[in-house]
Image: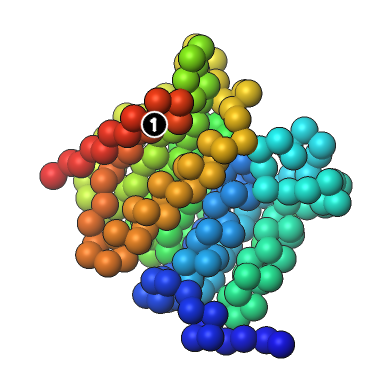
Amino acid sequence: MILNTTELGYYPRLLSGFTAQIIGAGGIGSNLLPMIARMGFGRFVIWDNDWVEPVNLQMQNFSAKDIGRKKSQLLRDLALSINPEAKVKAHGRRFTHGDALDGVVFAAVDSMKSRALVFDEAVKQRDKVTLLVDGRFARGEMSEFITLYVIDLNHEKQVECYRESLYSDEDAYHAPRSEGITAHVPYVLSGLIGSILTRWVKDGSHPWKVTHDATTLHTETYTVS
């Protein structure tokens, strides 16, 4: 039996008019997609050039039967299994300069170089990009950290504050790393994104930055005027 979106009861329904551009189908993108599919996004564009490997199963939303398959194709199938009426385009390659963006862009990538590329293209195409969402996690000696940025590309101060967060990959080697992150952390990040999107679609407001310690459960939110 095929149900329509009214019968499926997606909430909030206002998201049905938005595109979700998911750039990266790994630890962030694979766990994020099923949640935002259930939130009612009507269109998905997925970018990733990688295949599922056994090492991915610990913290990415894949199973043993998926090993050897393209991540982008698996997320396309997952989106359609949740909402058969969604329009889904899966690119089995990396996002690169000149690729078109629109809607809500999720920078679910694993390097600062890739984040800078997505940011540069989003700024160039700000007339079509509603929000840029960038989630990051890192593991310290005693804690696991989440940092989430939600940027309105037409808000110059948010754009400049985010630009300052884009340190080089060389500097990233001296910061806490993401290796060894426990399996629940990407789900926590996805939940934070869902909470912010729900607030945003209701009244247009959102913090530009959220930090969360997944060990102590301490959360801070930041806004810029």
Callout 1 secondary element = loop
Residue 110 seen from this side: yes
The x, y position of residue 93, in whole percent, is 70, 51
Q: Is residue 185 above or below residue 125?
A: above
The x, y position of residue 143, in whole percent, is 47, 20
Question: Label 1 neighbourhood size at 10 Å, few (<14), some (14-19), many (20+)?
Answer: few
Position of the C terminus, as image quadrant, is top left
Position of the N terminus, as image quadrant, is bottom right
Residue shown at 26%/46% (left/top)?
207
The quarter of the picture where residue 212 lies is top left
Say how many tags the image has: 1
Residue 124 seen from this side: no
Residue shown at 31%/39% (left/top)?
209
102 lies left or right of 49: left
Is 38 or 42 nearer to us in this picture?
38
The x, y position of residue 48, in whole percent, is 67, 49
Residue shown at 57%/38% (left/top)?
184
Q: Is residue 142 above or below residue 63?
A: above
The quarter of the picture where residue 214 lies is top left
Residue shown at 55%/31% (left/top)?
111
The x, y position of residue 205, in whole percent, is 23, 56
Residue bearing the label numbered 1: 217
Amino acid identity at mark 1? Leu
Q: Is residue 94 above or below residue 102?
A: above
131 lies left or right of 143: left
114 lies left or right of 127: right
Q: How is the image coloured?
A: rainbow
